[in-house]
Image (cartoon, rainbow, N blue to C red):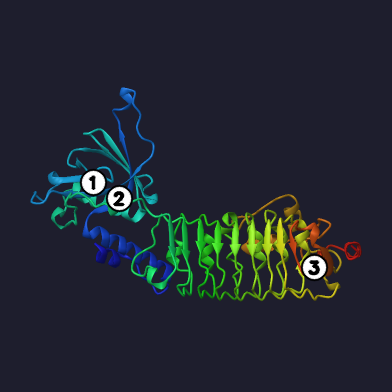
């Protein structure tokens, strides 16, 4: 089955590593099924007769082992096939006859690994939730069995009692702290919600990690990762991302877009070799905590002021010569910028005000002010990027190209209630501000 599956894949010169990893993972699952047609899954058994007796069914499934098989020595035809359901409480299992006993199979959500088998006798519905690849292969084998096709060649279960390990609850948390513990030939459990991989000399974020759809927390501290793949922005529900003590030098502007921009709440990039952060950092709308200590950052992006939910910011021991004045839009509970030179001179850095703004700038300003959020389906993708790159003057006006860039003094006590800056008495730092006019420069450079 596994070899046939590989031959059925349409290979091209442009086949990516991620596609290859997905195919190999599918082959691993199929190989497991070839040994014995039995899958680990969650099953809810619903008795259709109970409601007529004023009795209710359970509402939650049980970790189970579900197999298709026949008794040793029986005839290799559909009359000898059974579906075998085993749980931790019933390792011997319950056998459901297949031939003329399956009323219907519901497969509407099989792409999510969910399907239901309705039996005539007993009047049970087996509501199954499993890995999508395993679910589809299980149903395909069941279909071949019902059609009485090559049953002797199918890798069926012998209907023997199961072991405790086969019905253990899937792992949701995994901690790996040495190379010996890191799985090479086996896959990460697809049910993982928290993954910690430290001190294993990991040099990249593997595609199989990014494919974990239930992952909430990812800790890859103390490795040798140099860059982050942009596909990380597709991670479905990642909330906490820890990447401290690696060798990261730069970050793609695409990383902070996609699904990640809506889910990420904690980002730790401390103790790397990062010189620059992209302006798209401001798209992490849910971010609460940001750690940037121990890098070689000279500046922070102006878009940092868009992170209105941010409460904790640490950027100590960098090479910051100034801060973005947009920090004045935030109300932080804690801010640590100790150990930075803050050496930028005060005054105008660049004056981009050259008469009347362009039509593109005027239209984009109106879009932002009216809360319009067109996508690439509505306007060209380049215009979407331009639209999201708006800047805000300290007076509140939206700016694009027409603005004055100036270094002013920022009182950080108005930004954070807990402040670590330099000496005990220091409360201000030079800040790079976007100002909409000469009038605003005159006003804010004096404060």
Structural crowding at the residue carrying mark 1, measured as other residues with C-alpha within 10 Å and reported as few (<14), some (14–19) or many (≥20): some
Where in the figure is residue 340, as x and y percent of width and height?
73, 73
Measure how far apart labels 1 and 2 are at the Cα level: 9 Å
Q: In the rendered view, does 11 fall on the left or right side of 429?
A: left
Circle number at residue 81: none
* Residue 131, visible in the rendered structure: yes
Measure how far apart labels 1 and 3 are at the Cα level: 67 Å
Where in the figure is residue 259, as x and y percent of width and height?
55, 57
Where in the figure is residue 311, as x and y percent of width and height?
68, 56
Label 1 vs 2, first from the N-terminus: 1
For residue 92, above or below residue 150: above
* Residue 16, visible in the rendered structure: no
Where in the figure is residue 328, as x and y percent of width and height?
78, 59
Residue at image location 15% in from the left, 55% down from the top:
150
Snapshot quadrant of residue 276? bottom right
Task: Give the residue pinned by disc 3.
Answer: 431
Q: Secondary structure at mark 3?
A: strand
Please state which of residues 2 and 374 is positioned toward the viewer in this rendering: 2
Measure how far apart labels 2 and 3 are at the Cα level: 59 Å
Circle number at residue 167: 2
Quadrant position of the C terminus in the picture: bottom right
* Nearest to viewer (mark 2 / mark 3): 2
Q: In the rendered view, does 259 fall on the left or right side of 208?
A: right
Quadrant position of the N terminus in the picture: bottom left
Q: Secondary structure at mark 2?
A: helix
Circle number at residue 91: 1
**Contact, mark 1 vs mark 2 (Cβ under 8 Å):** yes
Residue at image location 38% in from the left, 51% down from the top:
111
Please state which of residues 196 and 104 is positioned toward the viewer in this rendering: 196
Residue at image location 69% in from the left, 63% down from the top:
386
């Amino acid at each position: 089955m596994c070899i046939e599956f590989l031959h059925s894949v349409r290979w091209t010169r442009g086949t990516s590593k991620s596609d290859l990893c997905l195919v190999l993972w599918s082959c691993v699952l199929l190989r497991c099924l070839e040994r014995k047609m039995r899958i680990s899954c969650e099953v809810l058994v619903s008795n259709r007769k109970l409601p007529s007796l004023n009795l209710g069914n359970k509402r939650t499934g049980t970790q189970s082992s579900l197999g298709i098989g026949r008794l040793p020595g029986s005839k290799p035809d559909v009359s000898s096939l059974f579906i075998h359901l085993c749980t931790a409480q019933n390792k011997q299992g319950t056998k459901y006859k297949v031939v003329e006993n399956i009323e219907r199979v519901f497969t509407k959500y099989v792409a999510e690994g969910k399907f239901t088998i309705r039996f005539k006798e007993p009047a049970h519905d087996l509501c199954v939730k499993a890995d999508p690849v395993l679910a589809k292969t299980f149903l395909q084998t069941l279909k071949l069995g019902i059609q009485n096709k090559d049953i002797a060649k199918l890798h069926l279960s012998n209907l023997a009692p199961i072991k405790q390990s086969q019905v253990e609850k899937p792992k949701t948390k995994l901690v790996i702290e040495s190379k010996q513990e890191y799985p090479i030939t086996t896959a990460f459990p697809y049910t993982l919600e928290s993954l910690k991989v430290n001190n294993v000399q990991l040099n990249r974020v593997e595609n199989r990690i990014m494919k974990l759809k239930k992952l909430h927390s990812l800790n890859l501290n103390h490795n040798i990762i140099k860059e982050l793949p942009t596909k990380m922005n597709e991670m479905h529900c990642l909330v906490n991302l820890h990447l401290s003590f690696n060798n990261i030098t730069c970050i793609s502007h695409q990383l902070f877009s996609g699904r990640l921009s809506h889910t990420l709440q904690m980002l730790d990039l401390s103790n790397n070799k990062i010189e620059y952060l992209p302006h798209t950092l401001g798209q992490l709308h849910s971010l609460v905590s940001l750690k940037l200590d121990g890098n070689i950052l000279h500046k922070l992006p102006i878009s940092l002021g868009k992170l209105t939910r941010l409460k904790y910011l640490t950027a100590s021991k960098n090479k910051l010569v100034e801060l973005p004045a947009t920090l004045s839009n935030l109300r932080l509970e804690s801010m640590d910028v100790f150990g930075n030179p803050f050496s930028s001179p005060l005054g105008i850095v660049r004056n981009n005000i050259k008469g009347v703004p362009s039509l593109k700038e005027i239209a984009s300003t109106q879009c932002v002010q009216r809360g319009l959020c067109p996508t690439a389906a509505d306007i060209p993708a380049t215009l979407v990027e331009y639209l999201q790159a708006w800047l805000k003057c300290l007076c509140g006006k939206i700016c694009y190209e027409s603005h004055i860039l100036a270094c002013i003094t920022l009182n950080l006590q108005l930004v954070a209630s807990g402040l670590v800056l330099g000496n005990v008495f220091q409360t201000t730092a030079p800040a790079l501000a976007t100002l909409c006019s000469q009038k605003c420069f005159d006003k804010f450079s004096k404060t």
